[in-house]
Amino acid sequence: MVAKNNRTITLSENDISRLNNKILLTPVNNLTFPPQGTFCGNFSEIIKFLPDKFVDLLFLDPPYNLTKKFESFKFNKTNVNSYTNWLDNVFLSLKRLLKDTASVYICGDWFSSVSIYEAANKHFIIRNRITWEREKGRGSKHNWKNTSEDIWFCTLSNNYYFNVDNVKLRRKVLAPYKINDSPKDWKEFGNNKYRDTYPSNLWTDITIPFWSMPENTKHPTQKSEKLLAKLILASSKEGDFVLDPMCGSGTTLVTSKKLGRKYLGIELEKEYCLLCEKRLENDNSTIQGYNGEVFYDRNYNSCSGLL
């Protein structure tokens, strides 16, 4: 029995039949370059048909170095050297697609990050490492509960786009300071006091998709639209091209569309490609936790007057 308020995106037989024709297939000789949409297949084969230097922003969410099943595909944990070499080859194959001004974001957990740094450092300029907190995490009696993930921020050169004003975070003011009875660096709206701050590389305001959120799918490692919106707004302009070569259920593509960017995704699993295309059909431009100007701290949607 499905919960009454469950808004998880699913595929009907009609969806599958209708959306099959929307998935991009190779060879791509009859497509406008670069194409927009979702390719189904192995990225290492599909990128052979793509042109050089067309990507402004690369978002890469590879399987982490742990054993995980993604429908028919299973990634098996390996030793650090093997995983590092695998990432090295992935980065090398994608590098030719990037403009000289491109930015790159690479996802990982604490264990995978060891390899990400070593491999990325060969190909890109590493700028920072974002660590974000997710609520969910399996507890352990013999170790600390893991509720953090990393996103490595890299560029191809020293000439890159970054607009921090696009990603300010609205926070409650816990100790409001006044000068001459006027707010100092904060604003007041009724009984609410808040400050719009520049973001750091520690994010505690991200809510991962769960069953009652309209963006949720069955994908086991789905990222939230709010998380992608921060990266896209900070590191690309309207009309720029965003590539996600392991796009899962399509969060990068959906968020890029909502924010006026061009987009292309590649995904190995057919079912995830269909979910991506179904999400792209939705004309809703809302991103939970973002009002078009600032991002809100976690659970701010329940704080009257701040949105």
Image (cartoon, grey):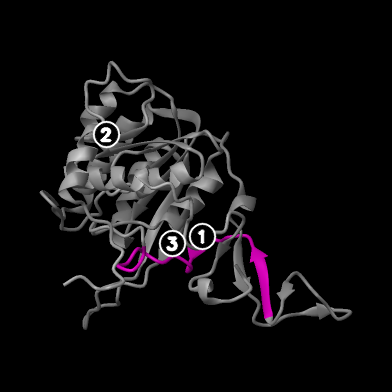
**143 lies left or right of 132:** left
Q: Which residue is mark 1?
A: 201
Q: Is residue 73 visible?
A: yes
Dot 2 crowding, Cα within 10 Å, few <14, some 14–19, many 20+: some
Q: Main secondary structure of the magenta part?
A: loop
The magenta stretch spans residue 131: no
Residue 236 rendering spot, x and y as whole percentages: 53, 40
Is 87 located above or below residue 92 in the figure? below
Q: Residue furthest top?
A: 29
Q: Is residue 247 visible?
A: no
Please report the bounds of the magenta region as a residue range.
192-213
Residue 131: numbered disc: 3
Q: Which residue is mark 2?
A: 22
Q: Identify the secondary structure beneath mark 3.
A: strand
Image quadrant for the N terminus?
A: bottom left
**Label 3, label 1: how far apart the Cα atoms are:** 6 Å
